[in-house]
Amino acid sequence: MNKTLFTLAWRETVRSAYWGKSLATSIGLGILALYFSANFLFLGIFIPRILAKEFPNDDPISKFNSIVLAYLAIELIVRQLMQKLPTVSFKPLLLLNIRRSKIANYLMVRSILSFFNVLPFFLVVPTLIKLVIPANSALAATAWFLSIAILIFSNHFLAIYLKWRFNEAEYGFFVLLAALAGLFAINHFQIVDLSGGMGKLLDLIIANPALAVAIIIIPVLVYFLNVRFLLSRMFINTLANRKKEEKIRDYSWLDRLGETGRFIALELKLIWRNKRPRSVAMMSVIFLLYGLLIYKPQHGHPLPEFLFIIGGIIIVGLFSVSYGQFFPAWHSNYFSMLMCQRLTMKQFLRSFYMLVTVVSVIAYIVTLPYAFLYTKIIYTHLAVLLYNLGVNIPLMFWIGLYSKKRLDLEQSSVMNYQGVSASKWLAAFPMIFGPIGIFYLFSLPFGVIGGYVGLGTLGLVGIIFNPVIIDYFSKQYRKQKHQLIRNYKNS
């Protein structure tokens, strides 16, 4: 039966309208997979040397075991953001003589074929060969390796279960982040030594290999938790009535801005009511914490300037870049209806500009405390903010003129490449790397401060001439609107 279901899934994939249309995306993902695999492999090869250098007084195997818990926690977050859920078209199968348990088990078995389950072994296998095997018996090394594999697959099934739950709860992912942050604080301030506990468990398994059999119960329990969840929702009437009731939110306070305010309210409703734009907004909030990763003070080693620019783009301008690169495709499902309304294209463009401007300014203000780490963040982020508003947003308007693919707003934005083409990938490069190139162009004759001044001045010029830019693009969009309607209808 599983073979039949695998065959049906493969036929569904290759017969899809999107099969063969995303070659550039597949190639890009393949390159990324090779890149991360190589990184993990090199880390695994050199990890004995790294542990000996950083922790000369500790047993390297015990130290590695104590790091496993932190790795699993980080991997759980990454899986939530990037790993796709196993899916299949339920309705046709439920009408056939196929038990629901067969379908649920098939989904869980198929989910194992994930890159995220293979990637850790590029790190674990070299560690096993270079660190564990030379110091222990073959039986102990095998038990250790099986224990690590069991924990990896336990994390896999746990990530799937949580993601299904989070799809039904709007703020579930943030609850997970808060819980993991609390556990990190408990471990960091040594209230409870969680990482040490995991390390001692794996040390105990090396000493007593038979204990590895006992932890098999963890992935088995989480596996059947997933199966039970699927069985409780795998009914035709449940699938047909999955539309959630929307909470009515009042945006009447935007009416004081006139027609522009009305269209800002339209954008806010679109973001709040649809999964894909809402996930973009949530990711933008999460990445406000990105500075904690890149702005770590390095004593005696100043951070390179491009990191401050990348940090500004990701922290201050992530929403405008990630949301703006699909403008106006966010409205593709009803774009023809929108063009029949009593509105001017100028109001449509201005409302988008005001929305991303307000969000970017708020992100800048909220992240000002990073200045306690590096005072220069005050003006580096300001320069990037001005550049983003004055240069990047007009660039998004220009890219939007040639938008061709309709977006499915009910799908998550994470690892979702529906509506993404090679041109979208190429268009993101000037938005992200353009500020770096311009900074270094100005910094060569005028120094570092001159580079930031030049970057901010260029953005300020764009902001000053924003009315002229809006007028120009409103004329271009009026000329292009019928082509955009055809593109969205045919995609």
Image (spheres, helix red, strand yellow):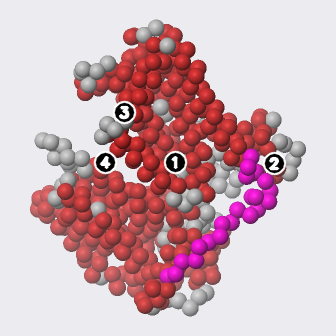
Farthest residue, direction top = 137
Q: CA distance from mark 1 to mark 3?
A: 25 Å
Q: Amino acid at mark 2?
A: Leu
Farthest residue, direction front = 191
Q: Nearer the viewer, residue 233 or 299?
A: 233
Q: Where is residue 199 drawn, in percent x and y?
A: 40, 26
Q: Where is residue 115 drawn, in percent x and y?
A: 54, 37
Q: Are marks 1 and 3 in contact (CB under 8 Å)?
A: no
Quarter of the rendering occupied by the N terminus? top right
Magenta stretch holds residue 237? yes
Badge number at residue 93 = 2
Tag 3 or tag 1, which sits nearer the N-term? 1
Q: Which residue is mark 1?
A: 80
Magenta region, residue range: 231-251
Q: CA distance from mark 1 to mark 2?
A: 27 Å
Q: Which residue is mark 3?
A: 193
**Mark 4 or 3, which is nearer the eye?**
3
Bin the neighbour count of mark 3 within 10 Å (Cα to Cα): few under 14, some 14-19, many 20 and up.
Answer: some
- Dot 4: what SS? helix
Residue under the point 52% across and 48% down: 80
Residue under the point 55% across and 60% down: 170
Q: Amino acid at mark 3?
A: Asp
Prevalent SS, magenta region: loop
Bin the neighbour count of mark 4 within 10 Å (Cα to Cα): few under 14, some 14-19, many 20 and up.
Answer: few
Q: CA distance from mark 2 to mark 3?
A: 48 Å
Q: CA distance from mark 4 to mark 3?
A: 23 Å
Badge number at residue 101 = none
Badge number at residue 293 = 4
**Mark 1 or 2, which is nearer the eye?**
1
